[in-house]
Amino acid sequence: MCGIVGYVGPKSTLDVLLGGLRRLEYRGYDSAGVSVIDPVEGLLTRKKAGKLDALISEVTEHPLPISHIGIGHTRWATHGAPTDGNAHPHLGGPHQKLALIHNGIIENFAELKAELTAAGTRFSSETDTEVAAHLIAREFENTGDLPTAFASVVNRLHGAFTILVIHEDAPDVVLAARRNAPLVVGLGDGENFLGSDVAAFVEHTKRAISVGQDQIVTLRRDSVEIHTFAGDKVTPEEFVVDWDASAASKGGWSSFMAKEIADQPQAVADTLMGRLSSSGTVTLTEIDGLSKADIASLDRIMIVACGTASYAGDIAKYAIEKWARVPVQVELSHEFRYRDPIITPNTLVVAISQSGETMDTLMATRYAAERGAKVLAICNTQGATLARESDAVIYTHAGPEVAVASTKALVAQITAGYLLALFMAQQRDTLSSAAAGELGRELLTMPAKVSTVLERLEAVATLGRDMADAKSVLFLGRNVGFPVAMEGALKLKELAYIHAEGFAAGELKHGPIALIETGQPVIVIVPSPRDSETLHPKVISNIQEIRARGAIVIAIAEDGDQLVGDFAEHVIFVPQAEPMFAPLLTVIPLQRFALELSTAKGLDVDQPRNLAKSVTVE
Ligand code: F6R
């Protein structure tokens, strides 16, 4: 959702802001703007509906002077349409000397607006944000001190917000406040930065501070001070960003999504690195806080996540229940806290989130923590709110994921789920050490197998292009193939804007088979025929049932499956693997299929319509 950048220092502020906004584009947005302060001309603002290029044309047509302090914003519309007028920054005060940008929703804006309107303030946008700009400007006129005025107003705001403010009469300082929306500080030498995430400034500095809940940052060239909303000084903890700017660039690929699909062997390998020995033993120092006795006494695990991350949770459920014998429930975060879930002191809540900023997941984990559950996060973003607020974090080392549609973060989340399941099995003695070791060693072979799948994707790419006119595609899977089917359908919906559904293959005859008519494409994730409790014959029967009704079947099957070819129009083979690990392989053709189909339709694969990368509102 909205991207935020702030800068004070010797560099050209416009370059820093536009560079930061470019790197934050992946969050999803529909307008963009910047404000800078020039010693002679004062506060200057440029903003435009549309993509960043529209803003760049605007500053080319109406140039800004070189200045050394400023703020920049990409807006994902909530209150008010994506127009030039609703774009941020918003200006405050009768002389418009204050500029403000905001990510989130100010829930009490109507009441604040009524108060300002009654006092004669004229509004120039339909946003909830503008009230904050006018209130702070008015308070500054009354108090003569910008930090004091800022603190007093943010204390009056309800809802979720990261807010940044600059004022022409206080030209050395950027003020920022954070409640329920992300904010990080970048620490430079004689310069400092603010961003929605580290992507905003990673090309300039790797030293960062993650700002806590209800905290205010006072950012100057040579100092960064942090206080709570109540005015208490905070001693911040610094961290070093562990990826560099090039990791967040396309590096010659046609899209970020194409690059991120190709990054997947590395994402799996990096997530395993240091945690899985060559003998197959799992070490998770991150959850040292949970003793063997704690793990033994767990009565249930609740996994909370949204979208693609929830499918990683579904796969983790199969692995944890099978190997560690703990009951696992997977819940969509936004449903979780509204149904009075049963949480006991022996419940472990595992929150899976690439961004670590998904508001639904944050609210679910806060709810669980308030009721006494321990929260373990599986998260891809250092310094993210989820990571800060959880009792422990297993970081997925997928590197920055820029395309809105999740790919490499998913395989890293699935990998982390396997590690957690094996670790728990070790701690609970529910697998023999020989069996656990064998699974661990097999898991170590997965990065190479993922590479093999990538080498074989041409056929699936052709299929995707050939099916650009499809109106609907169905996906079927069983066991761990079921969440893969759901993920295949989600990718197609979000990237190609066509109807797609994932079903458990066994569910077909209970209703969905009525959808099958001549020419209906169905992608089937076929389980391994080698599994002792194999579902293979059952899925082959499902394929026969749908083909008899005219479906065109594309099967994703493992090497050596002799039978499947007789029953499907197309077969995409992936290497043989332990059946529990197959999702790491079978999901990849589905990602590429969606990418090709979307590209063939001329759509923007990295930034699909209406979507944002980080969903920071409920
Ligand atoms: C789909 C996708 C989303 C995210 C979901 C959760 O491709 O990316 O469904 O998985 O919005 O996001 P995180 O993992 O950041 O909590």
Image: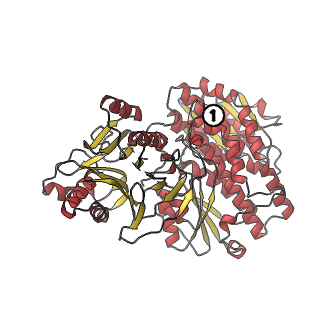
Q: Is mark 1 within 8 Å of ligand 1?
A: no
Q: Is residue 543 left or right of residue 114?
A: right
Q: Is residue 488 left or right of residue 230?
A: right
Q: Position of residue 174 (x, y in %)?
A: 35, 54
Pick the residue in front: 253 or 612: 253
Q: Amino acid at mark 1?
A: Arg
The extreme right residue here reads 434
Q: How many marks?
A: 1
The residue positioned 39% from the left and 72% from the top of the image is 232
Q: Quadrant of residue 214?
A: bottom left
Pick the residue in front: 458 or 512: 458
Q: Position of residue 204 (x, y in %)?
A: 51, 46
| 292 over 205 or under it: above or below | below
| 215 over 167 or under it: above or below | below
Image quarter of the C terminus? bottom left
* Residue 247 visible somewhere in the drawing: yes
Pick the residue in front: 561 or 280: 280
Q: Is residue 34 left or right of residue 471?
A: left
Colouring style: secondary structure
Q: Position of residue 145 (x, y in %)?
A: 26, 62
Q: Quadrant of residue 598?
A: top right
Q: Is residue 115 left or right of residue 178?
A: left
Q: Secondary structure at mark 1?
A: helix
* Residue 478 visible somewhere in the drawing: no
Crowding at mark 1 (Cα within 10 Å: few <14, some 14-19, many 20+):
many
Q: Quadrant of residue 484?
A: top right
Q: Position of residue 563 (x, y in %)?
A: 81, 35
For label 1, the residue is 592
